[in-house]
Image (spheres, rainbow, N blue to C red):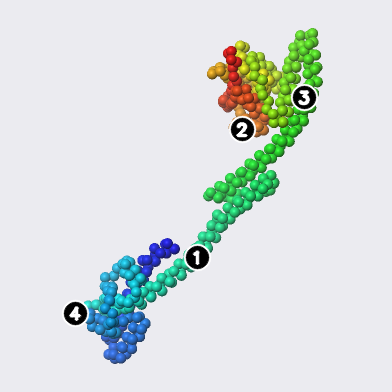
């Protein structure tokens, strides 16, 4: 409507000029007819009909500065407005259109146009201003009605387009969100998002991905809950079995034979770790965190023991331990053993596929912490595994693995005030970094 108003102002001015021009041209043709007809009565009849049809009050010809009346009579009103059409404008003056549109209509407009008869200077036509005002009002009403019709049609088309393109997809998304919020676990068929490149298409794709992710997470939670219950039951029974095994191990540790006694002592330590692991698992299932028992630990002996156990399980590799024998850490020996055992076992498994099978560990000390670098010559960790390396149930690449080893190892390291991270990996090998606090005497 604002555009229509801007367009209407010049169009109304053009209508006014056209209306005046049509009266002047009709009066010129009538004057030419009257001048060429000898029977004045016939000309008078024609003149009266013309004045009735065109609302012209008077027509005169101007010769030598004098006005010669052709038909009609001058009005009694002395208020005359002059409109000279002999100098035609492409764009008429807007102020004249506003003046005639909002005027009272008690004046007359004197139209000056080019003559149609030889020897005449100009043709004068007198029309009531009220007739012009009424014509402009009628034109305004017609334009207004057409504008309303066009606006209504445009509005309906825009509403239909917006409803189909925007409102309907938004309502569909809202219904989907409400339904998903009520029961996110309900396994309904996911509708594929439309291929749209605008924001609504992005919303549909994001909503589709969100539903898939949330349902996958809920499904994983159910599996984890089931797995946790199963682990609690297994660990409960396993603890009882290991307790009985511990009694037998104690007898072997006291055997007179030195070899059997050494194996028995090692077996006792393994059984004790197994019992503590079962107790920790049961405590975790009861939402109780296991606190580490920090004490001075000669780390090189623990490294050798974890490496020997890992190679006994997975296979022999070249093991190089450059950690100084005098290096003592403030750590929990059982937790640290589990960290090293997880790392060494994964490394030994990976090295079975490599031509050069070397596992090396070295130590560095800085700012009250010891940094253990565990490096190998394996094939490296794939990119899809590296993204979720320390996330539970996602990082396992070995057949039969659970993907929990590195997750548990990092938690155990952080529980002792340290950390476990991946430094580098590639075709030349992999390097893990394990940091643990030094003993205060170090």
Q: Residue at x 50, y 65 (%)?
A: 152
Residue in front for this viewpoint, 196 or 335? 335
Instruction: First in sequence, mark 2 or 4: give its number.
Output: 4
Mark 2 nearby-residue class (10 Å; few <14, some 14–19, many ≥20): some
Q: Nearer the viewer, mark 4 or mark 3?
A: 3
- Identify residue for label 4: 64
CA distance separating discs 1 and 3: 81 Å
| Number of disc labels | 4
From what the image shows, is residue 15 above or below residue 45? above
Q: Nearer the viewer, mark 2 or mark 1?
A: 1
Instruction: First in sequence, mark 1 or 4: give its number.
Output: 4
Looking at the image, the residue that sits furthest to the left is 64
From what the image shows, is residue 364 above or below residue 1? above
Label 4 sits on a secondary structure element that is loop
Would you say the residues marked 4 and 3 are in contact, meaning their CB atoms lie under 8 Å apart?
no
Residue in front for this viewpoint, 197 or 301? 301
- Identify residue for label 2: 388
38 sits to left or right of 202: left
54 sits to left or right of 310: left
Instruction: First in sequence, mark 3 or 2: give its number.
Output: 3
CA distance separating discs 4 and 3: 134 Å
- Identify residue for label 3: 239
Q: Position of residue 272 (x, y in %)?
A: 74, 19
- Identify residue for label 1: 152
């Amino acid at each position: 409507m604002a555009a229509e108003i801007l367009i209407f102002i010049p169009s109304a001015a053009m209508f006014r000029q056209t209306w005046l021009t049509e009266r002047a041209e009709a009066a010129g043709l009538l004057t030419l007819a009257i001048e060429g007809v000898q029977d004045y009565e016939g000309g008078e009849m024609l003149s009266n009909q013309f004045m009735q049809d065109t609302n012209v009050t008077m027509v005169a010809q101007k010769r030598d500065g004098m006005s010669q009346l052709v038909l009609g009579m001058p009005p009694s009103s002395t208020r005359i407005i002059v409109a000279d059409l002999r100098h035609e404008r492409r764009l008429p003056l807007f102020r004249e259109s506003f003046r005639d549109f909002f005027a009272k209509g008690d004046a007359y407009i004197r139209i000056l146009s080019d003559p149609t008869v030889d020897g005449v200077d100009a043709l004068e036509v007198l029309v009531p201003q009220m007739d012009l005002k009424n014509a402009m009002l009628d034109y305004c009403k017609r334009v207004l009605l057409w504008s309303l019709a066009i606006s209504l049609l445009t509005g309906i088309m825009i509403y239909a387009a917006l409803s189909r393109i925007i409102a309907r997809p938004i309502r569909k998304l809202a219904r989907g969100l409400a339904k998903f919020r009520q029961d996110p676990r309900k396994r309904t068929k996911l509708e594929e998002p439309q291929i749209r490149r605008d924001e609504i298409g992005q919303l549909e794709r994001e909503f589709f991905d969100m539903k898939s992710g949330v349902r996958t997470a809920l499904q994983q939670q159910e599996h984890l809950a089931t797995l946790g219950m199963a682990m609690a039951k297994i660990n409960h029974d396993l603890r009882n079995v290991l307790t009985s095994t511990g009694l037998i191990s104690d007898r072997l540790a006291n055997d007179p034979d030195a070899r059997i006694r050494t194996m028995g002592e090692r077996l006792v330590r393994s059984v004790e770790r197994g019992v503590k692991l079962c107790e920790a698992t049961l405590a975790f299932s009861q939402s109780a965190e296991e606190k580490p028992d920090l004490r001075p630990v000669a780390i090189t002996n623990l490294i050798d023991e974890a490496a020997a156990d890992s190679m006994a399980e997975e296979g022999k590799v070249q093991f190089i331990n450059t950690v100084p024998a005098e290096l003592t850490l403030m750590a929990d020996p059982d937790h640290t053993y589990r960290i090293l055992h997880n790392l060494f076992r994964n490394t030994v498994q990976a090295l079975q596929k490599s031509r050069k099978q070397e596992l090396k560990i070295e130590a560095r000390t800085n700012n009250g912490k010891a940094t253990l670098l565990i490096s190998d010559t394996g094939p490296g960790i794939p990119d899809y595994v590296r993204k979720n390396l320390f996330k539970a149930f996602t990082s396992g690449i070995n057949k039969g693995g659970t993907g929990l080893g590195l997750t548990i190892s990092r938690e155990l390291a952080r529980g002792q005030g340290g950390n476990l991270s991946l430094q580098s990996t590639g075709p030349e090998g992999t390097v893990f970094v394990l940091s643990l606090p030094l003993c205060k005497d170090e």
